[in-house]
Amino acid sequence: MADLLSDEEIQERAPDDWEREGDELVRTFEFDAYLEGVGFAAGIAGIAEEAFHHPEITIGWREVEVRLTSHEEGGITEKDVDLAARFDDLA
Ligand SMILES: C[C@H](O)[C@H](O)[C@H]1CNC2=NC(N)=NC(=O)C2=N1
């Protein structure tokens, strides 16, 4: 089990475009076309499965909302901040 990050660690380590909402890191990615968002969602799902750490993904009209938390630990861990950065690289 990974350790929960402190408030300060989360602030320091969460990538710039992500917001903290309680026990979650959240970012909404915007796209020019609906299917671009769908493709992005599929891509981050593959990264998540490889890491075996799974976000909540909501596909909307030309946007995809991604929420990361560590369920077993009950908060935000390094797994969440690391995946957030990897998802940003795919956008
Ligand atoms: C048994 C447990 O569900 C698995 O070990 C994994 C699956 N994916 C997961 N994803 C996330 N976000 N948090 C978890 O605690 C988690 N646990």
Image (cartoon, rainbow, N blue to C red):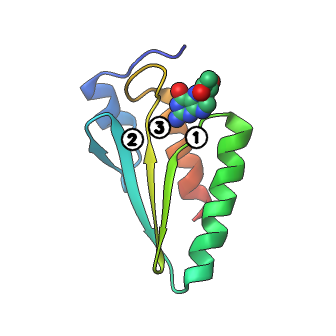
- Asked whether mark 1 lies closer than 8 Å to ligand 1, one says yes
Gap in angstroms between the C-alphas marked 2 and 3:
5 Å
| Amino acid beneath label 1 | His
The one nearer the camera, 87 or 63, is 63
- Ligand 1 quadrant assignment: top right
What SS does tag 1 mark?
Answer: loop
Q: Contact (CB < 8 A) between labels 1 and 3?
A: no
Residue 80 placement, left or right of 23: right
Q: Which mark is residue 54?
A: 1
Q: Quadrant of the N terminus?
A: top right
Is ligand 1 less than 8 Å from the beta carbon at label 3?
no
Q: Nearer the viewer, mark 1 or mark 3?
A: 1
Q: Measuring 65% from the left and 52% from the top, which residue is drawn there?
A: 45
Residue 21 in the image: x percent, y percent?
26, 43
What amino acid is labelled 3 in the image? Val
Return the disc, 1 or 3, that comes first in the chain's sequence: 1
Q: CA distance from mark 1 to mark 2?
A: 17 Å
* Residue 81: mark in rendering: 3
Q: Are marks 2 and 3 in contact (CB under 8 Å)?
A: yes
Mark 2 neighbour class, 10 Å CA radius: few under 14, some 14 to 19, many 20 or more: many
| Callout 2 secondary element | loop
The label nearer to you, 1 versus 2, is 1
The secondary structure type at the circle numbered 3 is helix
From where the camera sits, is residue 79 visible? no
Q: Which mark is residue 36?
A: none
